[in-house]
Image: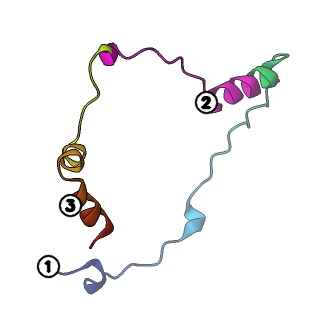
Amino acid sequence: MPSVMDAPELVEYVDTHDFTIETRAQPQPRHARPGFWRTLAHTITQYLTPRRRERHAPVCSARQPFETPADLFARQYPNLYIRAFCGV
């Protein structure tokens, strides 16, 4: 498949003086209502600062903690676990 660079195309000269530029009236700057910028800055600050989240007691707190396979291996074979952990 040919790339774009492999397909040259002849472009004729275009006279830019033929184009007319439409001029529209520039919009007039409007004034913000009093306190707008302060409110905006306060809102952005509140949005960007991290909120402290309340910690709730987990539902499964009455259960025993979950034991991983590594914990089980360490409890059953402490010597092998230490050797494997140290890379010996």
- Between circles 2 and 1, the one closer to the viewer is 2
> Which residue is drawn at the image coordinates 69% and 23% (left, top)?
43
Separation of marks 2 and 1 at Cα, in angstroms: 52 Å
Stretch in magenta: 40-61
Q: Per the image, is 48 magenta?
A: yes
Residue identifier under label 1:
1
Q: Position of residue 80 (x, y in %)?
A: 20, 61
Q: Quadrant of residue 17?
A: bottom right
Nearest the eye: 25 or 84: 84
Q: Which mark is residue 80?
A: 3
Residue identifier under label 2:
50
Tell me if label 2 and label 1 are in contact, CB under 8 Å: no
Question: Which of the two discs, 3 and 2, labels the residue nearer the N terminus?
Answer: 2
- When the figure is inspected, residue 1 is found, relative to residue 50, above or below; the finding is below
Is residue 31 rendered to the left or right of residue 47? right
Nearest the eye: 70 or 25: 70
Q: Quadrant of residue 59?
A: top left
Is residue 46 rendered to the left or right of residue 56? right
